[in-house]
Image (spheres, helix red, strand yellow):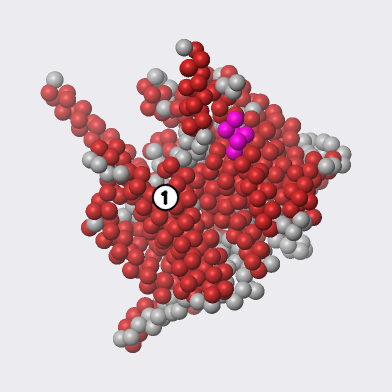
Amino acid sequence: MSNFFDILFSTDFAFSVLRVMTPILFAALGALISNKAGIVNIGLEGTMLVSALTGVIVSAYTGSAWVGLLAGILAGVAIAALLGFFTLKFKTHIILGGIAVNMFASGGTVFILYLVSGDKGASTSLKSATLPSLHIPLLQDIPVLGPILSGHNVLTYVSLVSVAGLYYLLAKTPLGLRIRSVGENPQAAQSVGVRVNRVQFVSLLISGFFAALGGAYMSMGYLSLFTRDMTAGRGWIGIAAEAVGRSTTIGTFLSSLLFGAADALANALQILKIPAELVGTTPYVVTVIGLVVYAVAETKMKKRKMTKKELKKAKQV
Amino acid sequence: MIKSAHFEKIRTLAVILIALLLTFLIIAIISDDPLRTILIFLVEPVSSVSHLGNVVEMAIPLMFTGLSVVLLFRTNLFNLGAEGLFYFAGIVASTIAIHWTLSGWLHPIVSILAGALTGALLSAIPGILKAKWNVNELVTSLMFNSILFGVGLYFLNYKLRDPQAFSNSSYKLQPTALLPNLIPGTRIHLGLILALLCIVAVHYYMYRTKWGYELRMTGSNRSFAEYSGINTTKVIITVHLIAGFLAGMGGSVEVLGMYTRFQWTSLPGYGLDGALVALLAKNNPLSVIGAALFLAYIRIGADQMARMSDVPAEMISIVQAVIILLISAEQFLKFWKTRMLLKEAGIRE
C-alpha cells in the first residue's frame, strides 16, 4: 500500500497524468466546439485514428515529423469536411454520419496500413518520425514543478495552449458568439442574419482539427508507431469529458485532467492487483453519474419554476 | 413510369448500386487481376451450400441487433447501446452454459433467457433516465457500451477463463447448452428460427397493436403524442426493455450457436452494424431480413476475396461507411423525387 502512495505522490506520476491526458483533452476540445454549435460529432474516435495513421505514413515517406503532423491535421480536417458536407448539405443525420466515420476509420486504417506496409497490426516496418519533446528553460530547473511540467511532447503544450485559445475564441470573438448563438437557438441566430450552416461547418472543421492533433499525438508522441485501433476509446472519453464539463471550456479541461489522472491511476493500481478492466471503466461511470445528477437537478429546477408560475397565476386570479 | 411513391425503394437500390460500384472501383485500383477479384467477391458467397450457410449464419446476429435498433430509431431514440448489451449478454449466457447443469432442451432456453433479460434490464437504465429526466440516451448508451465491455472482459479474464486454453477464451460451453444445427453441411443453427420469429412478432407489435401505434406516434412527435394522451414515459421505457431484450438474445444466441467457448476480447461490432441494418431496412421490421442478408452477403464476399485474392477484407468497412452516409442523406437524389412529383402533377392536369 505504501508502495502505491509512493507512486501516487511522485513527480513521475504527475508527469504521466499530463502525458495521458493530452489525447483525451484534444478529443474533448473537439467535442466541445462542435457541441457549442449544436452538432454532436461522435466521429472523433475515427478521425483520431485516421490522423494517427496519416501522420505515421507521411512522416515515414518524407522523413519529417512536421510534414507528417501537417498531413495528419489535413486528413482530420478533410474527414470533418466530408462529415459536414453530408450532414449540412445532404442532411445525413449527424449521429449516423459519426458512426460512418468511425466504421470507415476502424476498418479503413487497417486496410490502408496493409496496403502501405503489408502488415495488418502495426506500422513497425515504416520508419516514421516522432515529434520532439520540449525542455523549457528556467521552468525545468524549478524543483518538483520542473520535472512535472517540462520535457513533454510538443503537442502536450499545444493542447494546453488550445484550451486558452478555444476559451478566447468562444468567449471573446465574433465567430465564438455566432457559434454559441447557433448552438443555443439556430432559428433565432438565422433571423438576425447568422449563416447557420456555415458556422456549423466551421465548428466541425475546428473539431476535426483538434481530433487530428489528438490522433497525431497518439502515433507520433505517445507511441512512435501506428497500431490497429490504437486510440482505444480515447475519442469516447473525450466526449465524456465534455459532457461532465457541462460544455464549458474550463470544465472540459478539468474533467479531461481528471480522466487523465484516472487513466494514469489505472496503471498504478495494477500494483495493488485491482483489475485494469474495471479501473478502465471509471471515466464512463463518472460520466453517467455526472449526467444523471445534472439532469435530475435541472428537472427539479424546472418543476420549481413551474410551480412558482402557477402560484403567481393563482394569486392573480 | 416510376411513381414517386416508390422513391424510397429506388433510392435504397441506388445507394446499394453506388456502394457496389465503389467496391469495384477500389478493387480495380488495388488488385492485380480486378475482374477475377470482383467475380470472387460477387459469386463466392452464393457458390456453394457452405458459403451460403456462412451468409445466413452471419445474418442471424445482424437480424437481432438490427431489429433492436429499428425499434429504438422508430421511436426517435438515438440509442447505440446494442453493442454493449450484445457483448455482456454473451458473457451471461456463457456463464450459465459453463457452470450450470441442466437437461438438454432446458439449458439453452435458460441461458438465452438469462442473457436476454440481462439485456432488457441494463437497457432500461438509459431508457428510464431518458424518460424521467431527459438524460441524453445517446451519451449514456455509449458510456454503457464501454462500461459493459470493461465489466464483461473482467468476467472473462477472472471468472470464465480457461487457463489451459491457448488464447484468452473461456472454459468450454457444455454441449447441452449449444443450439442444435438446422441444416447439415452448414453451421446454420436454431437461432435463425428464433430471429425470424422475433421479427414477425415485432412487426405485429409495431403495426397491429395499440402499443405499436403509441410507439410510432411517440417517434414522430413526442410532445404531440403526450398531448393526445399517450404516456410517452411508459412507451420509451417499454421500447428500451424490448430493444435490450432483443440485443441480449442476439448475443446469447450468437455465442451458443456459433462457438464452443466464449472468446470475444473486443466488442464484436454487431451493435453498430445493427444501426446500418436498421437504416437499410428503413426502420421496417420485416425489411430487416433482407438488409441483414445483404450486409452478410457483402461481408462474406469480402472475406472470401481476402482469402483468394490480394485485396484485404477490411475494404468492406469503407463501403459500409458510404452506405450509411448516403442512405441516411435525406437530400440525396431528392431533386429526382421533386421532378417525379412535378411530372405526376402535370399528367393529372
The spot of residue B75 in percent (x, y) is 49, 31
Q: Main secondary structure of the magenta part?
A: helix
- Magenta stretch: residue B13 in it? yes
Image: magenta residue range: B10-15
Residue at 39% in and 65% down: A257
Residue at the left extreme of this rendering:
A316
Instruction: Pick the residue in front: B185 or B128.
Output: B185
Would residue B31 be found to the left or right of residue A143 on screen? right
- The residue wearing badge 1 is A289
Residue at 48% in and 32% down: B335
Q: Secondary structure at mark 1?
A: helix
Residue at 40% in and 80% down: A134
Instruction: Pick the residue in front: B172 or A246.
Output: A246
Chain under disc 1: A
Q: Is residue B156 above or below residue B2?
A: below
The spot of residue B329 in percent (x, y) is 50, 38
Instruction: Pick the residue in front: A11 or A198.
Output: A198
Residue at 79% in and 43% down: B43
Quadrant of image for the N terminus of chain B: top right
Residue B52 shows in this picture: yes
The spot of residue B147 in percent (x, y) is 53, 52
Q: Is residue B66 above or below residue A15?
A: above
Q: Amino acid at mark 1?
A: Ile
